[in-house]
Image (cartoon, grey):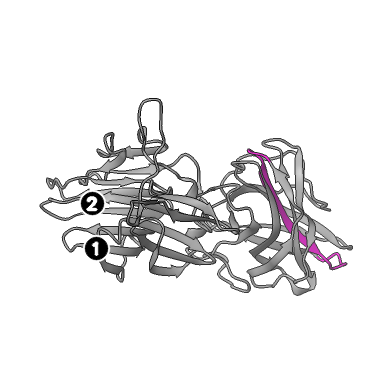
């Protein structure tokens, strides 16, 4: 699956000493972070050239986050970046060199794109210039390695006239820059690798927890606790928004999924209260959500901006059919889904994958809320991204499929849990 990065003015996490591309002018260039989320103000980097022969001018370098695991980056690369030439006669085109460092060193692990030179002349009014599906050379990266993007222009004119090439970067608009768009100060430019899924951010499907020995990889707050007898996480709704969150590494939902078994939902509160699963970036009011509202016995599928969705999908809550809640992203669509058993899923809502759903910096919370003084019973969750004891995964020739475990009772096949024997007991 594709992994998108944004060119930001945030300080580079590390700057290799050597500039690796073939540049006629590589002096006095800026550096920044190649980030998994847009950041910083919209700014520019520009240089003048006066060469009388074709010249390659480096404008800046952007350094990515460390790889989280050993993997191979392969496939293609695409980008849309804000570009401008000071005059049409400059005949400037994209110039790009991309490689991987061995950790925070000046050693090249491998080159992904070598001295690419574009064919589309930069416009004289700043606009998005696109390159799509450019083949890259595969590189086997190790944990800690970083991508470095060297970016500039090639000026094909052969006169001594001073021409300036400018690239826009940074900005935090809620949509990304498109080819030909002049919104270079409000929609950020980006670079996307077709096949780097899971290398720099973990797929959300990797957050696996059964709560068998505690809260595992989750942090929790506001009174959230481990229900030891039932091996679950308990979230007592209150005004502190108690909850739990996996936060050990960055996560991405693109091409992935995330699901919970919601075993118990709150009851008995005097005022407004709810339990919810929230998926989003940093706490800025933009997120998708499942939310159970006891007052109306409804389950809503929300797409919130500024903490609010004016048109949620609302279901009458069914404790059997809605026992499992799942977010899933595939081929540019996000799905809200429910299931009675984590085997058969029903789509409850869909939407096109928005810009922020492509971030590699996402987090997911299970949280609760209740009015001050209201004390509903806790919600409880279990089996995060893992099948229940009554199911197994079976290879069907193309993928691992979840199947029920059935036992012959003497009269019929019944779904039964799988148990293992320790030295002293079945568990």
Q: Residues within 10 Å of mark 1 (few under 14, many from 20)?
A: some
Residue in front for this viewpoint, 105 or 226: 226
Residue 21 position within the rendered picture, expressed as x and y whole percent measured from the top left: 79, 50
Q: Residues within 10 Å of mark 2 (few under 14, many from 20)?
A: many
Residue 285, quarter of the rendered image: bottom left
Residue in front for this viewpoint, 321 or 13: 321
The answer to whether residue 160 is magenta is yes
Residue 40 shows in this picture: no
Residue 215, quarter of the rendered image: top left
Q: Residue at x 76, y 37 (%)?
A: 107
Q: Is residue 340 left or right of residue 295?
A: right
Residue 173 position within the rendered picture, expressed as x and y whole percent measured from the top left: 49, 62
Residue 175 position within the rendered picture, expressed as x and y whole percent measured from the top left: 50, 66
Q: Does residue 81 lie above or below 107 as drawn?
A: below
Q: Does residue 126 lie above or below 286 as drawn?
A: below
Q: Is residue 427 left or right of residue 83?
A: left
How far apart marks 1 and 2 lie (CA) works out to 11 Å
> For the magenta stretch, what is the residue range?
142-161
Q: Does residue 354 lie above or below 382 as drawn?
A: below
Residue in front for this viewpoint, 372 or 124: 372
Q: Residue at x 72, y 45 (%)?
A: 140
Q: Is residue 253 left or right of residue 140?
A: left
Question: Extreme front residue here?
Answer: 410
The answer to which of marks 1 and 2 sits earlier in the sequence is 2
- On residue 355, which mark appears? none
Residue linked to disc 1: 317
- On residue 265, which mark appears? 2
Describe the element under mark 2 as helix, strand or loop.
Answer: loop
Describe the element under mark 1 as helix, strand or loop.
Answer: loop
Q: Are marks 1 and 2 in contact (CB under 8 Å)?
A: yes
Question: Extreme left residue here?
Answer: 270
Residue 414 position within the rendered picture, expressed as x and y whole percent measured from the top left: 34, 54
């Amino acid at each position: 699956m594709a992994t998108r990065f944004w060119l930001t003015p945030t300080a580079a996490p590390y700057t290799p000493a050597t500039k690796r591309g073939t540049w006629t002018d590589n002096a006095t260039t800026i550096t920044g972070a190649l980030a998994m989320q847009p950041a910083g103000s919209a700014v520019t980097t520009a240089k003048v050239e006066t060469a009388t022969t074709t010249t390659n001018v480096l404008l800046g370098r952007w350094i990515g986050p460390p790889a989280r695991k050993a993997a191979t980056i392969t496939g293609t690369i695409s980008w849309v970046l804000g570009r401008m030439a000071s005059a049409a006669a400059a005949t400037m085109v994209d110039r790009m060199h991309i490689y991987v460092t061995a950790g925070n060193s000046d050693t090249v692990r491998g080159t992904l794109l070598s001295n690419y030179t574009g064919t589309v002349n930069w416009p004289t009014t700043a606009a998005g210039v696109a390159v799509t599906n450019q083949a890259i050379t595969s590189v086997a990266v190790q944990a800690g390695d970083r991508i470095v993007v060297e970016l500039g222009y090639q000026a094909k004119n052969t006169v001594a006239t001073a021409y300036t090439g400018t690239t826009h970067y940074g900005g935090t608009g809620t949509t990304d820059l498109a080819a030909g768009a002049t919104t270079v100060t409000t929609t950020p430019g980006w670079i996307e690798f077709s096949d780097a899924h899971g290398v720099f951010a973990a797929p959300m499907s990797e957050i696996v927890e059964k709560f068998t020995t505690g809260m595992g990889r989750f942090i929790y707050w506001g009174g959230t606790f481990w229900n030891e007898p039932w091996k679950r996480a308990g979230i007592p709704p209150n005004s502190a928004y108690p909850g739990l969150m996996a936060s050990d590494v960055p996560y991405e939902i693109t091409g992935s999924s995330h699901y919970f078994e919601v075993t118990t939902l709150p009851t008995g509160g005097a005022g407004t209260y709810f339990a919810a699963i929230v998926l989003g970036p940093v706490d800025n009011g933009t997120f998708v959500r499942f939310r159970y509202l006891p007052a109306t016995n409804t389950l809503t599928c929300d797409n919130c901006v500024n903490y609010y969705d004016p048109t949620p999908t609302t279901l009458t809550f069914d404790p059997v059919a809605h026992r499992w809640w799942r977010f899933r992203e595939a081929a540019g669509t996000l799905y809200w889904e429910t299931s009675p058993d984590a085997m058969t899923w029903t789509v409850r809502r869909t939407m096109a994958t928005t810009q922020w759903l492509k971030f590699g910096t996402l987090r997911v919370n299970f949280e609760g809320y209740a009015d001050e003084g209201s004390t509903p019973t806790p919600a409880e969750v279990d089996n995060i991204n893992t099948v229940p004891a009554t199911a197994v995964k079976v290879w069907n020739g193309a993928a691992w499929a979840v199947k029920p475990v059935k036992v012959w009772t003497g009269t019929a096949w019944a779904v039964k849990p799988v148990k293992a024997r320790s030295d002293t007991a079945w568990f």
